[in-house]
Image (spheres, helix red, strand yellow):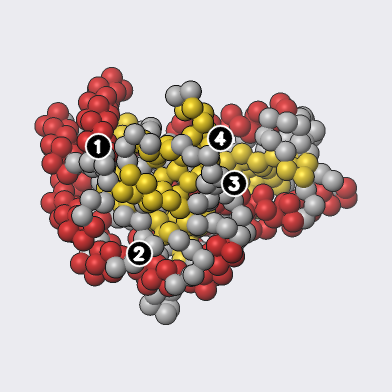
Amino acid sequence: MRKAALHNLGCKVNAYETEAMQEMLEQNGYRIVPFQETADVYIINTCTVTNIADRKSRQMIHRARRQNPKAVVVAAGCYVQKECDQDGLDSEIDIVIGNNKKQELISILEKYWTRVETDDRTKEKSFEDGRWQYRESIDINHTKEYEKLKLTRTAEHTRAYIKVQDGCNQFCSYCIIPYVRGRVRSRRPEDVMDEIKDLAKNGYQEVVLTGIHLSSYGIDLEDGIDLLELIVRIHEIKELKRIRLGSLEPGIITEKFAATLASLPKFCPHFHLSLQSGCDDTLKRMNRKYTSGEFYEKCLLLRKYFGHPALTTDIIVGFPGETQEEFESTKAFIEKTNFYETHIFKYSRREGTKAADMQGQVSEMEKAARSNVLISMGKEHQRKYETWFSGKMVEVLIEEKISWQGKEVWTGHTKEYIKVALQSNENLQNCIVKVEIGDDCQIID
């Protein structure tokens, strides 16, 4: 029995794909071991969203080689997709698997070992030390095929992240992802339903729908189904108790969208809307498809139908050309909108994107200073939002038991994704309980 170890880098979509590859390996007789242990096969699902992600991908590839020089090192995903296109692949990699090819992991491994045994190296790149590299990749920007991956269980025992969409058509000026993930491709609704039904029967109470550009779900499907219709269908699965969404674009928030979701008891009022900047001039340079005013209207619409929903967002500070005045506009917008959580990212110059060649690159020192200001503001907004729930009844999905402040407590998340801790002598694992936020049930970081 061959031993395999996997390591994931990057987003929830990558995490889903890594778990799907692990399940394929298990079903085909591999024994899964921790990445830090000696294995016959190391699989790194790489990320390339930033230069730091590139570096981490390379580091994990080299770490795998050091741990077992004789192992087969497999690098999959976005970083190698980009490097394959540029012929810049690391020589420590034995097998390269680009995006939309992870579903073929088992057959690729079998082909590799067959070629090793027969010395048939017709598709590979050879290196001076006698090692060679087998590559499986496609022209990702010209495929309409949705990669068929599926899970029956996940690393989490209560909540399952489900990939329903891949690719992006937006081409924001700072982002490399459309070039390595390709155009929008949506998963067939019946395949989504089948997977969620299986997971729900296996005890998963909540699903989180994810994608590279989730809001675009369905635009390529002939039957006209969109994300809202998909959610309505999923809501009918009897065993499932909660539905949560990954990151959304503000354009998807309409009166119908908000009203329909508010009518679904299983839907979690937790919306992550990607803002990136509160300044219209910056948004235009970013090639975002909305103004700050339009974004704010969407937030008001959600609050109209959900009362006190959790609104979270992403902000990029130090985008090329961002003046102090533009930064102050973003700061004022965040103050006005009052998000629950604000995830702050310092702009990372990404070769191959339009923003990398823009004038007015902001210094790292200034980026750090602006980032610190917004992080501090975000913490205060988070505290205020969570304080609002004091004394109120909430529904919590219990996930695990931990040691906290010298006590053994159960922890879980509310529908708004607020983490809480409560004490109980009962086994509450994977139970949904109603509790009052107060002395016996406290919000924790």
Q: Amino acid at mark 2?
A: Pro
Tell me whether circle 2 and circle 3 mark residues in contact (CB < 8 Å).
Answer: no
Can you give x and y, in whole percent of width and height, for residue 339 in the image?
Answer: 23, 42
Q: CA distance from mark 2 to mark 3?
A: 26 Å
Residue occupied by mark 1: 387
* Point 41% across, 45% down: residue: 413
Mark 3 / mark 4, whichever is N-terminal: 4
Give the percent coordinates (x, y) of residue 206.
47, 56
* Residue ID for mark 4: 57
Nearer to me, 376 or 438: 438
Q: Position of residue 260 (x, y in %)?
A: 28, 69
**Residue located at (52% from left, 73% from top):** 190
SS class of the residue under badge 3? Answer: loop
Kind of residue indicated by mark 4: Ser
Is 436 left, or right, of 428 in this rendering? Answer: left
Does any portion of residue 114 appear in the rendered image? yes
Point out which mark residue 34 bears. Answer: none
Label annotation for residue 265: 2
| Circle 1 Cα neighbour tier, 10 Å, few/some/many (<14 / 14–19 / ≥20) | few
Q: Marks 3 and 1: which is nearer the front?
A: 1
Mark pair 4, 1: CA separation: 39 Å
